[in-house]
Amino acid sequence: MRLVILGGPGAGKGTQAKQLGGQLNISGISTSDILREAIASQTDLGRQAQVYVEKGELVPDSIMIEFMRQRLLQPDAARGWLLEGYPRTAFQAEELDFLLDELDQKLDWAIYLQVSDSEMMSRSVGRSGPLSENTEEVLVAADSRPDDQPEIVQRRINLFLERLPLLLEYYSYHQRLLTINGEQAPEQVQQDILHKLKV
């Protein structure tokens, strides 16, 4: 099974990705982890991405899709995967589909964790540790970047909401969208996802 998990800041994407990956025996793939590792090990792509990350800019789509290509060619991806942190736009969703066609893989479902603006805000403000859901934005340790400041969180929520309609429309058009109430307890969210996946 091949899945992507969509949701705004604080929606619980990382939590669900970890749990579902284990439950479904597929690889959980976090784009923020991929970026961190590539930058830390100074791969060619990592060095290219680092230039943007250090300036606080988004990593270009052309670099992100190349990260996806390399990761989805890894042996563990053959048994299936759950991608968290990508795609974030309808353009990226289309790019991912082109890549999957090329790799002879097919996305089964895009799971959207629906959470209200106010819930995203209250979950995000004040949480500690690096924010794994902040993939394309700056990847810096939380203690050196005020990621959980309300105004920064609000900007991230606004950016997510700007991109969301076209992203959902894309997956809805292709009949691959599952919408889940992300405001429930994590265990209930997971149960709902598994039920909709008919697992």
Image: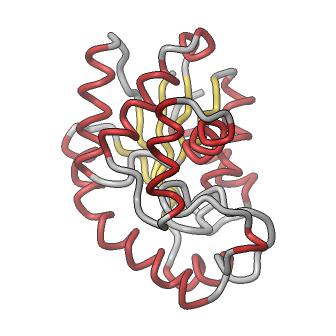
User: Looking at the image, which is closer to me, 109 or 156?
Assistant: 156
To which quarter of the image does residue 182 belong? bottom right
To which quarter of the image does residue 36 belong? top right
Find residue 21 and report its horizontal and vertical position in percent: 67, 31
Is the residue 32 above or below the residue 141 in the image? above
Is the residue 181 above or below the residue 4 in the image? below
User: Looking at the image, which is closer to me, 7 or 173?
Assistant: 7
User: Looking at the image, which is closer to me, 18 or 48?
Assistant: 48
> Which image quarter holds the C terminus?
top right
Find residue 180 and report its horizontal and vertical position in percent: 51, 55
Is the residue 99 above or below the residue 36 in the image? above
Q: Residue furthest bottom?
A: 151
Answer with left or right where residue 184 lies relative to residue 105: right
Answer with left or right where residue 27 lies relative to residue 1: right
Answer with left or right where residue 87 lies relative to residue 135: left
Q: How many marks?
A: 0
User: Looking at the image, which is closer to me, 106 or 31?
Assistant: 31
- At a point 30% along the width and 65% down the height, the residue shown is 163
Answer with left or right where residue 124 lies relative to residue 53: right
Find residue 83 and report its horizontal and vertical position in percent: 52, 37
- At a point 73% along the width and 73% down the height, the residue shown is 144
The structure's colour scheme is secondary structure
Find residue 185 and report its horizontal and vertical position in percent: 73, 62
- At a point 33% along the width and 37% down the height, the residue shown is 176
- At a point 75% along the width and 82% down the height, the residue shown is 126
